[in-house]
Amino acid sequence: MAHSISVLGAGSWGTALAILIARNGHQVALWGHSAEHQARLETTRCNERYLPGVAFPDNLMITSDIAHAARHAKIVLIVVPSHAFRETLTTLAPHLGAETKIAWGTKGLDNRSGQFFHHVVAEMLSGGFATAALSGPTFAVEVAACLPTAITIASDQPEFAEGLATLLHNGHFRAYTCADMVGVQLAGAVKNVLAIAAGIADGFDLGANARAALITRGLTEMMRLGVVLGGNVETFMGLAGVGDLILSCTGDQSRNRRLGLALGRGQPLKQAVIEIAQEIEGLATAKIVYQLSVAHGVDMPISEQVYQILYEGLPPSQAVDNLLLREQKPESAILPRCQSRHP
């Protein structure tokens, strides 16, 4: 059965998801805020900037009219940068139907409040909309090229999660479901910060041993904060957690990793951001994660050093020394002594 879905956000990931869903036989509207960019997409029937050479299916409609996009769809999938999530939701809200369901593939936290996006949606919208978060190890170029991919869809409404999974599923794309909205979203945010750290380590040519240790201890940090905030340990050991962490820390398509590589090789932060010329979610998220760790008394030394580099001017070489010279301790005591729980 064909459905009507609107994807908000015509960057690489939003475009890849729109193409995927359209290829699966559904009617898709792809919205972007720039009328000029959208007109170019319609003319070329391809997103040459982000996914060159990948043709749009005929059932993929392009629009810069968010009201039209909202009216088109029973499901709205938001895939904008984290800093634009709240603004996009504000613009979208007046045009939503009572039965519209809302999902997002944005990875990060609300830049203004540090909230999870399902809290932002609940705060800004009335009417009890069904919501879901998509996350996992995904490079948009590989999804568009039909390479094997698997993600996690989290929702407190199982029927919605299962319906989304069905929309996305095909012979090269699998979607698993869970109810852990906090864990899935927290993992997608923290992994961006840790990818910057991994890039810095590789920029210094510290070797594969160091990279593996950093990923492992970074996962520990993610789990510590996640459990305190109400996530489930199992989530962090799955696709949205360790899966996405490994991808972002090792794959050079990751913009966060590329930022770290540049910093580790001595490039100034501002210059690195200009040269990458795309959204680097870990920049804003590093500050939010650091603030959350302080507020909740969670030890996150790797994330703290990334924050110090980005916001306090700490030289990356000093951050490496700070981590290596930390007090020796048992590896086993990694999680708070509390049970994980749903919010």
Image (cartoon, rainbow, N blue to C red):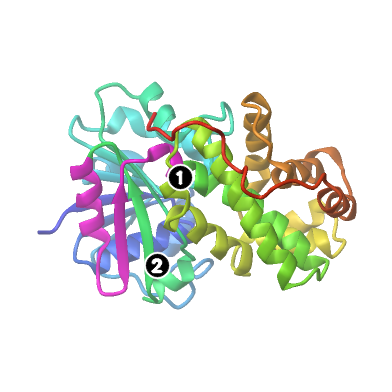
Kind of residue at badge 1:
Val
Please determine whether, in this image, residue 116 is positioned above or below residue 132.
above
Please determine whether, in this image, residue 188 is positioned above or below residue 216.
above
For the residue pair 144 and 150, the one nearer the viewer reads as 150
Q: Quadrant of the N terminus?
A: bottom left
Which residue is located at x 87 percent, y 50 percent?
Answer: 325
For mark 1, what is the residue? Answer: 233
Q: Which residues are magenta?
A: 158-184
Please determine whether, in this image, residue 235 is positioned above or below residue 214.
above
Q: Residues within 10 Å of mark 2 (few under 14, many from 20)?
A: few
In the rendering, at what x and y percent does residue 90 appear?
A: 42, 29
Which residue is located at x 50 percent, y 70 percent?
Answer: 48
Q: Is residue 118 visible?
A: yes
Q: Residues within 10 Å of mark 1 (few under 14, many from 20)?
A: many
For the residue pair 338 and 10, the one nearer the viewer reads as 338
- Looking at the image, residue 280 sits to the left or right of residue 30; the answer is right
Residue 148 sits in quarter: bottom left
Kind of residue at badge 2:
Thr
Q: Return the disc, 2 or 1, that comes first in the chain's sequence.
A: 2
For mark 2, what is the residue? Answer: 43
Label 2 to label 1: alpha-carbon separation: 47 Å
